[in-house]
C-alpha cells in the first residue's frame, strides 16, 4: 500500500521559514517524481513544486519561485520543502503527491496517490 | 500557463442520475494530458481519470472521461451516495501544472 505522510506544518509569522517533510512507503520511491500541492482553506488545489526521480529537474509555481526549495533523499524515501520568506497567502494544507508516470518530468505528471496533508498557517 | 475553467460550479442531482462535468482549457492540452480528481470533505483528493479517458486503479466504470484539445468531460453514470463530492480537473501538458477551480456535485 502506498503511504505518504507529511509533517512539519505549523503556525509561523510572515517572513519566517519552515521545512516540510514527506515520508513515503509502499512503492519504489526513486522511480517516480514527487510533488507538493497545496489547498488554501475553502479553496481549490494549487500545484506548488515537483522534483524528478533523480533530483535532476525541479519545477515551481510562479507564486513560490525563489522562496521555496524542493529536495528529496532517495536513501530515506523522503521529500522536503524548504519554505522561506513565508507570506500570509501561503497559508494552506500542503499535500505530498506521488507522480503517476514512471520516470516522468515534473511538468508531464499527474498525481496517483496523496498524503493527508500538513497545515501551514502564516499569521502574525 | 494553461487556465482550466470548470463548469458548472455546482451540480445538484439525485442518486441514480447522470452527472456531466466540463473542463475547458485556455489553450490546447498536449496529447490529452488531462486528469480528474474527486475530493470529499476532510479528505485528500483521489485520482479518477488520467490521459483524459483512462480510469485509475480501483475506480468504478460508472466514471468516464472524454475529450481532447481544449474541451474535456467527466461523466458519472448512476450517481451513488458516495459520489457527492468536489471534482477537479488538472492538465499536465504544459510547463506549469494547473488545476481547474472545481465542480461540486451535491445532493438535490
Image: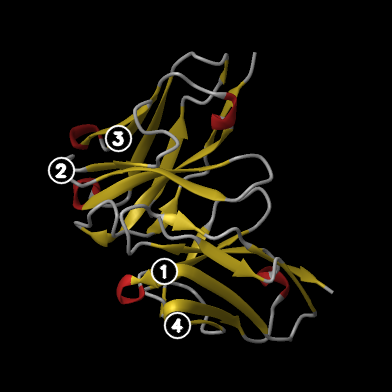
**Quarter-of-image position of residue A1:** bottom left
Q: Which residue is mark 2?
A: A54
Question: Given this view, does label 2 or label 4 mark the residue nearer the observer?
Answer: 4
Q: Are marks 3 and 2 on the same chain?
A: yes
Q: Which residue is mark 3?
A: A78
Given the image, what chain letter belongs to the residue carrying mark 1? B
Q: Which residue is mark 1?
A: B27
Q: Secondary structure at mark 4?
A: strand
Using the image, determine if residue B25 lies above or below residue A96: below
User: Left of A1 or right of it: where is B37?
Assistant: right
Q: Is residue B48 visible?
A: no
Q: Are marks 1 and 2 on the same chain?
A: no
Mark 3, other Cα within 10 Å: few <14 / some 14–19 / many ≥20: many
Residue appearing at x 45%, y 50% in the figure: A114
Residue appearing at x 76%, y 80% in the figure: B15
Q: Is residue A5 visible?
A: yes
* Distance in Å between CA atoms under marks 1 and 3: 35 Å
User: Left of B51 or right of it: where is A115?
Assistant: right
Q: Are marks 3 and 4 on the same chain?
A: no
Residue appearing at x 57%, y 65% in the figure: B5
Q: Secondary structure at mark 3?
A: strand
Mark 2, other Cα within 10 Å: few <14 / some 14–19 / many ≥20: some
Question: Given this view, does label 1 or label 3 mark the residue nearer the observer?
Answer: 1
**Quarter-of-image position of residue A87:** top right
Amino acid at each position: 500500500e502506498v503511504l505518504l505522510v507529511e509533517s512539519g506544518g505549523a503556525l509561523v509569522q510572515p517572513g519566517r521559514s519552515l521545512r516540510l517533510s514527506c515520508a513515503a512507503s509502499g512503492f519504489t520511491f526513486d522511480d517516480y517524481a514527487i510533488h507538493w500541492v497545496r489547498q488554501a482553506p475553502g479553496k481549490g488545489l494549487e500545484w506548488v513544486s515537483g522534483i524528478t526521480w533523480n533530483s535532476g529537474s525541479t519545477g515551481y509555481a510562479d507564486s513560490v519561485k525563489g522562496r521555496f526549495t524542493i529536495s528529496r533523499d532517495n536513501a530515506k524515501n523522503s521529500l522536503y520543502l524548504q519554505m522561506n520568506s513565508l507570506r500570509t497567502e501561503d497559508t494552506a494544507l500542503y499535500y505530498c503527491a506521488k507522480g503517476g508516470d514512471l520516470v516522468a518530468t515534473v511538468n508531464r505528471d499527474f498525481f496517483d496517490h496523496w498524503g493527508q496533508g500538513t497545515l501551514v498557517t502564516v499569521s502574525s | 500557463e494553461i487556465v482550466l475553467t470548470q463548469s458548472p460550479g455546482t451540480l445538484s442531482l439525485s442518486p441514480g442520475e447522470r452527472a456531466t462535468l466540463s473542463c475547458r482549457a485556455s489553450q490546447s492540452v498536449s496529447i490529452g494530458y488531462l486528469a480528474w480528481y474527486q475530493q470529499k470533505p476532510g479528505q485528500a483528493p483521489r485520482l479518477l481519470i488520467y490521459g483524459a479517458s483512462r480510469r485509475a486503479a480501483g475506480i468504478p466504470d460508472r466514471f468516464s472521461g472524454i475529450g481532447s484539445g481544449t474541451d474535456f468531460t467527466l461523466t458519472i453514470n448512476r450517481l451513488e451516495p458516495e459520489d457527492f463530492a468536489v471534482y477537479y480537473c488538472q492538465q499536465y501538458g504544459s510547463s506549469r501544472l494547473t488545476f481547474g477551480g472545481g465542480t461540486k456535485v451535491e445532493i438535490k
